[in-house]
Amino acid sequence: MRKSASLWFYFLISILFMETVFRLATGGSLLSQGSAVSAVFSIFFATACFLLVTIFGRRMAIIISAILLGVAGFIFSSQMMYYVIFRTYYTVYSALHSTQAFEFWQDTLAVVFSNWFWLLFYFAPFLVFIFFGRKLVQFPRLTWPTRALVAICLLLTHGAGILMIHAGGQARFSAHDLYYRTNYHGLAVDRLGLLTTMRLDVQRYVGNWTPATPAAAMQPTPDNLHLVPATRNQLDIDFAALIADEEDETLRNMHKYFSRVPATAKNEFTGIYEGYNLIYITAESFSHLAIDPELTPTLYKMMHEGYNFRNFYTPIWGVSTSDGEYVACTGLLPKRGVWSFAESAENYMPFALGNQLAPLGYTTVAYHNHTYNYYSRQETHPNLGYYYQGIGNGLEMSGGRPRSDLEMMQVTLPQYIDAQPFHAYYMTISGHMYYNFERHQIAARHRHYVEDLPYSEPVKAFLATQIELDLAVEYLLMELDAAGIADNTLIAISSDHYPYALREEELAELEGAEIEQNFEVCRNAFLLYTPGMEPMTVDKISSSLDIIPTLSNLLGLDFDSRLLAGRDIFSTSEPLVIFRNGSFITDKGRFNSVTGEFMLELGVQVSDEYVEQISKEVAKRYYYSTKILETDYYSRILP
């Protein structure tokens, strides 16, 4: 039995080693409850591996042991590389839908080579076993009573991990909350360990798991559901009848919840751009840090001569970069663990701007200067009400990846400029990572503009990519002006996410100071501009989640603000910026779910229950955004 124990001990040391290295590499703490929980579950995984290999003879035990250690090394190293690239962790869903990522294989390979030392750490247990494993696997095949004893130990170690989770309390964002109730992937890795988080992800994916219904949804329903105040952004939905007729408990709870959400009031900005043409751009990796009077003069002009949103954020989400576009195009939070945009492709999406404007006689078109079916955009964008073109289904452009934003504007603008009123949506690509002058043709094109700047090469290359976006917008404004319709066209520009391919120290170069990594790294710009508008600075806290209700209100569209997770920025609703890990910002302060700290704004006082109240509101908006997606809810309540 002593010889057998040496293999179990090797599995344990290997898993503990990989979990520890991973925690250090991703900024986790070694002296925390999460480390202790992870260590106990490491014993569980080591025992499970040992029990599996002892079923076989010595030769097969050696082979299976090597495979298990190799798979573990691959899991840790691939999650590490994914984190380096996307600042998050992949899920089972994203792994199963990862084939399109091979279009950027050169960039991925560059990341692997630049982080080879981490790969060496994660595969070290496998490599050591290859050379010395035969000495560890010396046991005869175990008897079934002995295996039963090992199985009991397996159950006991799992039970010990569960006991530790319960001992830590059931507060929001605790290990207990993450294990049983919520799905904050990044926090779960920190508080449960990577292998346990991935085990839960597999279980939830197979079981189609969803968080429990928030308790607030069970509150009594008000009696005045039939009222539709003319002063509210609210449609005539008979929630009372829906509740009375609904047999499905989930849908009935949704009806109750949305019936109680206060609709935002119409305001002085309602309809001020009614009938205007609309050009809406989601700019790849765009950042306010790139707006400069000399490098990007058109973007600078739009910021200072249009609406300048000084406290705007574009959070990154948990699965793919398409989540940022999904939020900006739907006003809903993404469902955790899946590509929400792709999952919405067959749903009724009435509040997408294409679907709102097309029935009003607008020409509605959408373009993407990358492969047309990347992230299933050939399905999602027509479903949003657009005639859609990308590379491969009608959009013809020169050059290789990433392609030119300017050329996209030059090719596409003639298709709709004479078909007023029009609404054009663009997802750009010129700002795509990685930022260098050797493989990034857009950065190389504008290298001479940035070469003498006092920055590192990645920062210079990033700024060079944003020059291309500026030139595209400059061309757009010039052509609109030449056509005599510039002052009747509203242009909105936001980002899918901040340029997370830049490291912390590189972002600090642009900022001129270190940038706080939970909140301020997501600070960004939202540009609203039409020539001749009265410039205005907007200090209200807001995010990309608020774009759809804000534009809908400005254009005077009939929409129901209760059915969106975002809010009209110009309304009197309390501002709320939601982040992927449950952190939030309001006008009262900011809550960091990682540290559990709430930082009050100067001179502000709140009740002891304030953080819990807002955290519950965040959870509800996540939950009901998910349920809208899962149940195709809009099709059930709207004609």
Image (tube, rainbow, N blue to C red):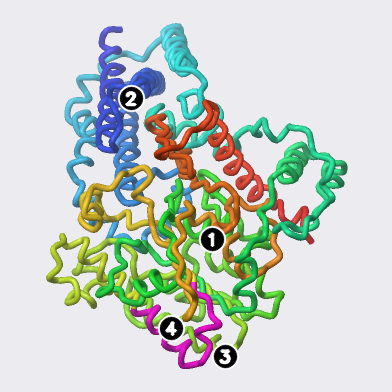
The mark nearer the N terminus, 3 or 4, is: 3
Q: Which residue is mark 1?
A: 547
Q: Residues within 10 Å of mark 2 (few under 14, many from 20)?
A: many
Label 1 packing within 10 angstroms: few (<14), some (14-19), many (20+): many
| C-alpha gap between disc 3 and disc 4 | 15 Å
Q: Foreground mark, 1 or 2? A: 1
Which is nearer the N-term, disc 2 or disc 3? 2
Do the numbered discs 3 and 4 sit on residues whose CB atoms are within 8 Å? Answer: no
The CA distance from mark 4 to mark 1 is 21 Å
The image position of residue 138, as x and y in percent, is 25, 16
Tell me the tag on residue 477. 4
Asked if disc 1 and disc 3 are in contact, CB closer than 8 Å, the reply is no
Question: Any mark on residue 418, and which?
Answer: 3
Residue 454 located left or right of residue 559: left
Report if residue 439 lies within the magenta region.
no
Callout 2, which amino acid?
A: Ala
Say which label, 4 or 1, has the lower sequence index. 4
Q: Amino acid at mark 4?
A: Leu
Q: Position of residue 310 (x, y in %)?
A: 41, 58
Instruction: Tell which of 130 and 167 is nearer to you.
Output: 167
Cα–Cα gap, marks 4 and 2: 68 Å
Span shown in magenta: 471-491
Residue 480 is inside the magenta segment: yes
Residue mark closest to the camera, 1 vs 3? 1
Q: Secondary structure at mark 2?
A: helix
Quarter holding residue 598: top left
Q: Residue sitting at 45 percent across and 11 percent down?
A: 156
